[in-house]
Amino acid sequence: MDKKEMQNIDKEIDNKQQELDKLMIQKQEIAAKRKEQMKEILLDALIIGAGGFKVRHGMTAPYSHGYYAQHEMMKEFCKPVTCDSVWTSNIPELLYKYLEGKGWTDADYEELKVKSDSLWSQMPDKYDATLYEPSKTYLHGNHVASGYEVDGFYNIVKGRCGGTYSSMTTTTQNDLSRELIILKGYCAEEFLSKRLRVTSTEDVLKAVYQRHGIDSDFSSADGWAENNPTRCMADNKYYKS
Amino acid sequence: MIIYAFYGLGKTTFSQNNILCVDMDAEYYYFENKTMDGYVDRLKQLSDSGKIVFTNIRREIMNDNLVDMSFIPETINVSLKRMISRGTDSSFILELEARQEEIMNDLKIRFEKAIIIKDDEYISNYKDIIMQKYNALSQKGD
């Protein structure tokens, strides 16, 4: 083999190596994108309560109650949902790693997505006053708004979708969890405690957002939502207006 | 003998000062075991072994005729004041405050013959009555 042939082979090896590097980068990008999609599926499932995943309200320690994300069958995974707007990314990240350890496959995620989508499709898409009328049942006074309705955010702000402590914390659907998630989890437990003591939901939201240095002018609730898309997930299905 | 006592009435203090007593706090049991499964059996087991067992069992898992004696507060504030002063987490206080009417109605229905603890009283004020009942039950068991 002469020198030129050797050089050609080397060049070809370099080219192949570059192609391989590109493919590796593409593979990593695809894996990263896939991971983001999986995390989105998990967040979706937590919000809607699909496949056994749910944001629950209950005991976080003896004589302490709060919000936490958990799966009904995998109770060892239990992460608090607190006054932290980034939990919507942190908890899916931790959950993804946990499920990776459990051997979850693409098929498992696909199955979960189907369940979530099915539940989302059953959601009412408009505020219905009769739905939020006080219930006659002893334990759970009112339904609470979930914000997924077309005008849900407006009605949350106007306090038309209140509930009793029980309905806000312990109903199976746990609508309040979704409501708080829609509000990007800003001080979930504070929102709950203040709302019980202060009559106006609007005042509670103003106080919470003011503390976080966020526009708290609710003179136009839908206008506020438009101006603050990242505060109520206005870009996706969790908030529609 | 199994005794129901609502929060903040002095069951832990009473249990710590009486060798016959065991405080089976349901909050701690659930937190440690992640389930209430086995709780009622444990109460019975301890009771059968001659202990005076205190419980704050929730209604969801309570059987009829499980308890031999019960203590409830005159008003929810009797318990709340004591829990606040000993630094119980505000989330728990909040729940009791928010559900006070429901809780008190439930207690009165569940424990018709309960001893009512007033603001200045504790379970220890009723030590003689507890021991009389314990002795009576022990003799019956013999």
Image (tube, grey):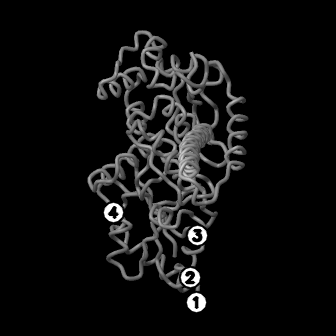
- Chain letter of mark 3 equals B
The mark that comes first in sequence, 1 or 2, is 2
Name the kind of residue labelled 1 in the image.
Answer: Asp
| Mark sitting on residue B122 | 4
The mark that comes first in sequence, 3 or 2, is 3
Distance between the Cα atoms at labels 4 and 2? 26 Å
Q: Quadrant of the N terminus of chain A?
A: bottom right
| Mark sitting on residue B142 | 1
Q: Mark yes or no: residue A155 visible.
A: yes
How crowded is the residue under tag 2: few (<14 C-alpha within 10 Å), some, or many (20+)? some
> Looking at the picture, do discs 4 and 1 lie on one chain?
yes
Name the kind of residue labelled 4 in the image.
Answer: Tyr
Q: Quadrant of residue B115?
A: bottom left
Q: Secondary structure at mark 3?
A: helix
Q: Mark yes or no: residue A171 visible.
A: no
- Chain letter of mark 2 equals B
Name the kind of residue labelled 3 in the image.
Answer: Val
Distance between the Cα atoms at labels 1 and 2? 12 Å
Residue bearing the label numbered 2:
B48
Residue bearing the label numbered 3:
B40
Vertical comparison of B137 with A205: above or below: below
